[in-house]
Image (spheres, rainbow, N blue to C red):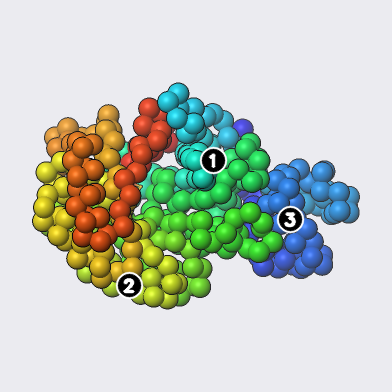
Amino acid sequence: MLKQKEKIELKGMTLQQMKDYFSSIGEKPFRGEQVFNWLFNHLEFEYDNMLNLPKELRERLKTSTSLISLDLFDYQDSPSTKTKKYLFRTYDDKVIESVVIPEKERNTLCISTQVGCPLDCKFCATGLMGYKRNLSAGEIVDQYLLAAKEYGKKFITNIVYMGMGEPLLNFKNTLDSIKIFTNELNTGLSRNRITISTAGIPPKIKELADNDIRIKLALSLHSCFDDIRNKIMPINIKYPLKENFDALRYYAKKTKTRITFEYTMLKEINDRSEDIKALTHLCKQIPSKLNLIPFNSIKHMDPDGFSGQLEPTAANLIEEFANQLRDNGITVFVRNTQGDDIAAACGQLAIKAS
Ligand code: SF4
């Protein structure tokens, strides 16, 4: 069982933090570069195999630092797709999930940033389990490292922060993990293949833009009307659509990227003709594209609450909805529901054991 929190977690350090750490223990900063290279390019997590470090330093590192942030204890394969869900245990016995989604031209890893989530979106199983704690930068990064170790460094081409939790509510650790993934010494991942998905925290969207990170940003939109979105995503009461759209415009301008709007299709709630009109207006105001997502059933939803009323829009109606938007000049994609059979699709990540 992993219990390493009393030791310093090296996997969560940016390159600069790692160099500073080695300076602080009286070593040359380039030792930080060497360890960073072992971790992220060679996927080597044993000091004994880091042969360009002096033996005495390796022994010192073993006693004061840890290269184990998560314990990969189980996984589930989808029989119908090649989607694979990973289950990780943390040092304090919490359980989190990541999902690898292989596709024709890319392989995406969907990672978590919190144990549970405080935002309670009504279509989402993670929201129903409540919030336990933020993940450390090392725990965020280790989801990638352990999956990459299994598949090989080149296999995972894309990372989406779309697993358990709201990444912008764990801002510093999320930002550190992005700095690690996009560091030029970490070959193989590029910033335009990393996407953060947020429920909409405008001050943090602006802060992210000001950090010169320039990764892609997705907003879980699901309705262009505040009264409906308030019911689907209670965070909208605190941060209504206008504030989010202003922040997204700022992000798009500052980073020169297009925003992705994620839109889960809910029967008679957001699939009406007025929704097409509002989406068309929105997508013409902000450089963007729109992903339509079929709604996945969540077995343990509250049958008496609003979530119990949610039903999926039929597949043929989703296509019709998409075509009408395309006719209006909007870039629209209809997403496959990969991993539905192992509860690894959007909104289905939740672990009762946590
Ligand atoms: S959709 Fe995302 S932000 Fe909303 S409850 Fe689920 S994990 Fe949290």
Picture residue at 23% right of the left edge, 43% below the top: 319
Q: Is mark 3 within 8 Å of ligand 1?
A: no
- Percent x, y for residue 301? 24, 34
Q: Name the residue under label 2.
A: 249
Separation (CA) of disc 2 from disc 1: 37 Å
User: Which three-letter amino acid code belongs to the residue tagged 2?
Assistant: Arg
Please indicate whether residue 327 sits to the left or right of residue 55 in the image: left
> Quick one: 143 or 139, which is closer to the camera?
143
How many angstroms separate mark 3 from mark 2 (CA)? Answer: 37 Å
Q: Which of marks 2 and 1 is nearer the N terminus?
A: 1
Dot 1 falls on a residue whose secondary structure is loop
Q: Distance between the residues labelled 1 and 3?
A: 24 Å
Q: In which quarter of the image is residue 305?
A: top left
Q: Could you classify mark 2 by the number of other residues whose Cα lies within 10 Å: few (under 14), some (14-19), or many (20 or more)?
A: some
At 76% from the left and 43% from the top, the residue drawn is: 46
Identify residue type, mark 3: Asn
Q: Which of marks 3 and 2 is in front?
A: 2
Q: Can residue 119 be seen in this view?
A: no
Give the numbered dot on residue 143.
none
Q: In this view, does 145 lie to the left or right of 99?
A: right
Return the mark for residue 37: 3
Q: Mark 1 points at which residue?
A: 90
| Mark 1–mark 3 CB contact (< 8 Å) | no
Q: Which amino acid does label 1 sit on?
A: Thr
- The residue at 27%/33% (across/down) is 297
Indicate the secondary structure of the residue bearing disc 3.
Answer: helix
Indicate yes or no: mark 2 CB to ligand 1 under 8 Å: no
